[in-house]
Image (cartoon, rainbow, N blue to C red):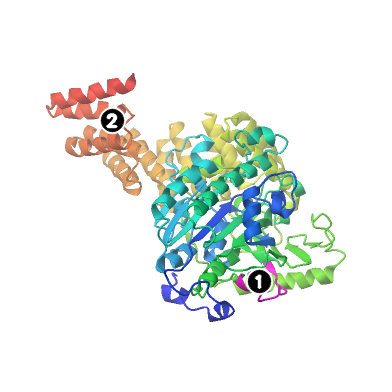
Amino acid sequence: MPFSRSIFITLAAVALSLVVPLSATDKAAPNVIVITIDTLRADHVGCYGYKAIRTPTIDSLAADGTRFDRAYTPVPVTLPSHSAMFTGTYPTLSGMHDFSGNVLNPQQPTLASVLKENGYATGAVIGSAVLDSRFGLNQGFDFYYDHFDFNRLQESNLEEMERPANAVVDVTLDWLGKNYQKKFFLWMHLYDPHHPYRPPPPYDKEYVSSLYDGEIAFADAQVGRLIAFLKQKGLYADSLIVLSGDHGEGLGEHGEKTHGFFIYNSTLHVPFVIHLPAASSVKQVEAPVSVADLMPTVLAALGIAVPAKVQGQSLVPLIMGKAKPGDRTLYSETFLPRIHFNWSELRGAETANYHFIDAPRPELYDLKKDPGETQNLFPQKKAVGEEMRGKLNTLVREYSANQELAQKTGLDPALMERLKSLGYAGFSGGGDPNASNRDLPDPKDRIELYELISEAISDAQHGRLQESADKLTTALKTEPNAVATRYLLGLSYYRLLRFEDARKEFTRVVELSPDYTLAIFYLGLTNARVGDFDGAIASLKRALELDSTNFSAAFNLGVAYLQKKQIPESIAALRQSVTIYPDYAEGHRALGDVLAYAGQPDEAIVHLRRAIALDPGDPRPHVSLARVLAAKGLNTEAEAEMQKSRELHR
């Protein structure tokens, strides 16, 4: 049930009562710049004490502002972490636990939507497809530069799904060049430190022993270009600037190579720096804070009412030295094991002294004595552990809603392919994030299996399909009924052209999880490959029932009907594919061909011309159009189209 705008937009009097706005007039309102750097561990940045790297831009910004030594993300995954930053709410309310089938509720205020309502020009430049506008974070932005191509199901180059920091900054400076004389809010997102680590020259040589550090150093240098622009235009001193990581990186600690699977501080702890305009500030804050504090802090600093449902806290009193750190408990979670593998979720509570992780085998760490979280004290300190569990339960009750706000959407197969190209588990194993079951496997007991499956995904993404299939087969020896693993094995078999083996795996997946939309979709494709068009039609129709946005399912349904010579049904399905996705060139071409075959040349011409406009380099619609034009007696036009097709074939 959608929440009304009036419920959200109310004056947060308590939050603002401690703060004197930094500007009293609209003319003097400072610009706001938020810089997020993906996969950035705080302990790999110079100003946080790391000596093996040069990060002069971040270090200088911290020297000019306030450095938060203990800032944490509530979720070590890019999309939900950024959702927390820009809505000021935790996943228990927003519903943004992961990236599988969730869209931010358009009724939920974001920092951009609130600032836009207050007269700001708003722009964002995104470095990765995992923050594509289809996930909803574009809400409130006048300009949201994502521009990633999701529209092909075949494997694609990794570069198509992320852009390097220099390209992000190029677009950012272009937008700023047109908007810097206005009151503006800018969000710039850099993805570079994300795995795989491939820093450009000279950072690849300078940091050859730690390519991860090389990516960070490169990102820092590119942030420097933005800061230089602000200084050149006289904007830096009077701007409100926030720089934050979205999550850290495991780097092998606790057996986790990347992030998202565990909630240790190796992946929760991030750099967090706030530069307030023309205001004296405390240079260093040691109190634990959350990235969910970003939105209320910015709004409080500007003297703008904080929406009522915001759960983060304004940090302005800490920055201005007007408040002492309280005894705050921070919430964290990961539902990646649950959603994708049906293993137990993890939830945590962290104070200044302790970190508690609620798992089938609970964990408790003394952060003063054991900052690396290597000695689980829960068996020895059960009283402290139970006290921390009580704090966690209180947070969950406080932060939860009767119904989470995120809207559900289908697992678009093109999108899932693209997420896998970025190293994300682009599938769902059927776990329900709203249910809790302590009988599920503890992620600690599955980390080796998870890393094996992750390696299999990487193998498949880089064309090592047999190696992928071998690893997935090995993984199934541990969990024979693992839905996600069998689905991935089916994909590898499909791409190896072992269609009977693929059909066996997809059939088993659907038996285990009858509403597994992507498995049903691929079962339809596989049935068609082995000549079972009745089976293909049944599966593809079911896939569309479960996900009405799957344009590829509609397209392939049309092809299956054509094989059965059911022309009206084929036309209807192909028409559905281009209705779902109007810029689907292949859909328009196929629809034009079938319409021509069915004796509807005028409509065929419309769709074939549309296909040509969408994909000018494809000679096939020119050939088809030439035939239709010739059949209508338009020989001159037909010959012109044939000439174009010949030129494209050269």
Residue linked to disc 2: 621
Q: Secondary structure at mark 1?
A: helix
In the rendered image, residue 156, in percent from the top left (x then y), is placed at 50, 35
Residue 317: quarter of image: bottom right
State the quadrant of the C terminus: top left
Task: Choose the circle earlier in sequence order: 1 or 2.
Answer: 1
State the quadrant of the N terminus: bottom left
Mark 1 Cα shell of 10 Å, populated few (<14), some (14-19), many (≥20) = some
Q: Is residue 317 above or below residue 373?
A: below
Residue 504: quarter of image: top right
Q: Secondary structure at mark 2?
A: helix
Is residue 324 shown in magenta? yes
Is residue 207 shown in magenta? no
Instruction: Report the front residue among 250 and 214.
Output: 214
Residue 335 in view here: no
Residue at figure coordinates x 72%, y 48% from the top left: 446
Instruction: Report the front residue among 148 and 388.
Output: 148
Identify the residue at the far top of this view.
Answer: 650
In the rendered image, residue 172, in percent from the top left (x then y), is placed at 47, 49
Task: Say which amino acid is labelled 2.
Answer: Pro
In the rendered image, residue 220, in percent from the top left (x then y), is placed at 61, 46
In the rendered image, residue 75, in percent from the top left (x then y), is placed at 63, 58
Instruction: Report the front residue among 265 and 523.
Output: 265
Most common SS among magenta residues: loop
Q: Which residues are magenta?
A: 316-331
Q: Is residue 280 above or below residue 185?
A: below
- Per the model, the C-alpha gap separating discs 1 and 2 is 64 Å
Residue at figure coordinates x 67%, y 44% from the top left: 480
Task: Say which amino acid is labelled 1.
Answer: Leu
Residue at figure coordinates x 17%, y 29% from the top left: 629
Q: Is residue 291 above or below residue 301?
A: above
Residue linked to disc 1: 318
